[in-house]
Image: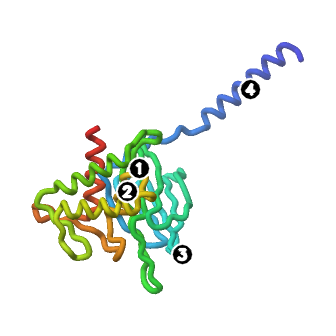
Amino acid sequence: MPQWSRVLLSLLICALTACNQSATPAAPTRAPLRIEGSTTFTMSQRTTAALPGSADALLLTIDDITGGQTMTSLEWRDGEHVLGPRALYLNDTIDFSVAEHHWRLTLSQMHNELIGNDWVEFTLGERAPPGAVVDAAAEIEALLAAVAELEGAEFIRNGQSHAPATAAQHLRDKWHANESAITSAEDFIVTVGSHSSASGEAYTIRLADGSTLTAERWLSDRLQRIRAQR
């Protein structure tokens, strides 16, 4: 091949490569989710909703609730796929990252009726970065200590009021009974600290100022504070 032909071919290849590179759109910059601690929200089956704190930009879609599960997917409003569809059962989780923050979405309640509207409740909270060394038992012990020391509070379990120290001991006993299934503080909160295993009824906490919130919310918020203090 003549020298001028080689030069022309090289210029043509460079031009085509440059065109292809310029045609590739840059990945959009995502704003971090604006959530303090954790949050819970409900969704009816066969619906799509924006995740809390996402400025209406990150969309969660669930399909029919049947057979104890629902197909779940997550994508940005501009069409960028995040994950799914994936079958989620009660207490299953989805891990994902936004703007270098790491999040866990847990299917924390499921309501399935033969007649009527079926719905699920999700809990969304920040999680430890992938690869981070986390002492789950130490975090759970810190949560139990925080429960026992919650002065002036009442823990409501199946309609009965319990003192903080009594509630902490109950959660400890329940943790040890389910220890093989608890691998993280998040597992402890969802499986042990959120609801009665006997009735399925959510635990609640009446604080000293008279306000009431779910134990799951209080424990999730406290876990974030524990991690922030490291």
- Residue at point 31% right, 62% down? 173
Q: Is residue 112 above or below residue 13?
A: below
Task: Identify the residue at image location x=37%, y=54%.
Answer: 186
Residue 61: give x, y in percent of width and height: 48, 63
Query: Gap in Å between the C-alphas at discs 3 and 2?
Result: 23 Å
* Count of numbered badges drawn on the protein: 4
Using the numbered discs, state the Cα–Cα distance from disc 3 to disc 4 in whole angstroms: 56 Å
* Tag nearer the camera, 1 or 3: 3
Disc 3 residue type?
Gly
Query: How many angstroms separate mark 1 from mark 4 (CA)?
Result: 43 Å
Q: Are marks 1 and 2 in contact (CB under 8 Å)?
A: yes
- Position above or below: 136 against 52: above
Image coordinates of residue 221 in percent, x first then y, are 27, 53
Q: What label sits on residue 124 in the rendered view?
A: 2
Q: Nearer the viewer, mark 1 or mark 4?
A: 1
Amino acid type shown at disc 1: Trp
Position of the C terminus by quadrant: top left
Q: Is residue 203 visible?
A: yes
